[in-house]
Amino acid sequence: MKLAAMMRNVPPAVLLSLPLAAGAAEYMEKTPFQLSRAFSPGVVTEGGKIVWVAGQTATRDSQGADIANNFEAQVKQVFSQIDQVLRRAGGSLASVVTMTVFIKEPRYGDRFVEMRKDMFQNGNYPGSALITVSNFARPGIEIEIQAVGVIGDRCSSDQPCSAEGQAKKR
């Protein structure tokens, strides 16, 4: 059985609990504030396959349960969907280099940041924007995430492409 076929049968909660492989990208040095908010000031890539992931929303989880108006369940489901798209392209959630996050309720901003830290446990956080919107296209949606992933890039912390990273290696 192919890995992709096997992965379709794995519940998202299990997928999200797996350790993420280090992505091939160089994550620029983060200030304490940037670390606390789980984002990188810049992510440097050179080469690799770019995957533009459409905005992902969810009002049902992968088992079909209703998660309308449930912010935390939607965050988990949306990250799972992004991971699934990137796996189909040969990457994973760890391949995400930038994301634009839209939330309906500003009160969920800090909770989202904490949940994002859990999704990127290696500390290589994507560049990110977190935007509050007044509503979404369908009732019950609390969050939408649009992402860009880079798969097979040649840059990394061990092989920096940025001037900042190259200066540190000298």
Image (tube, rainbow, N blue to C red):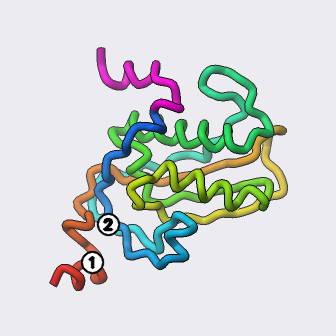
Q: Is residue 93 above or below residue 117?
A: above
Q: Describe residue 51's horizontal placement relative to residue 21 as left or right.
A: right
Alpha-carbon span between mark 1 and mark 2 = 8 Å
Q: What residue is pinned by disc 1?
A: 165
**Along the polypeptide, which appears first: circle 1 or circle 2?**
2
Q: Could you classify mark 1 by the number of other residues whose Cα lies within 10 Å: few (under 14), some (14-19), or many (20 or more)?
A: some
Q: Position of residue 121 (x, y in %)?
A: 43, 53
* Callout 1 touching callout 2 (CB < 8 Å): yes
Q: Position of residue 128 (x, y in %)?
A: 55, 64
Q: Residue at x 78, y 54 (%)?
A: 104
Q: Position of residue 64 (x, y in %)?
A: 67, 21
Q: Residue at x 65, y 63 (%)?
A: 130
Q: Which residues are magenta?
A: 1-14
Amino acid type indicated by mark 1: Gly
Secondary structure beneath label 2 = strand
Q: What residue is pinned by disc 2?
A: 26
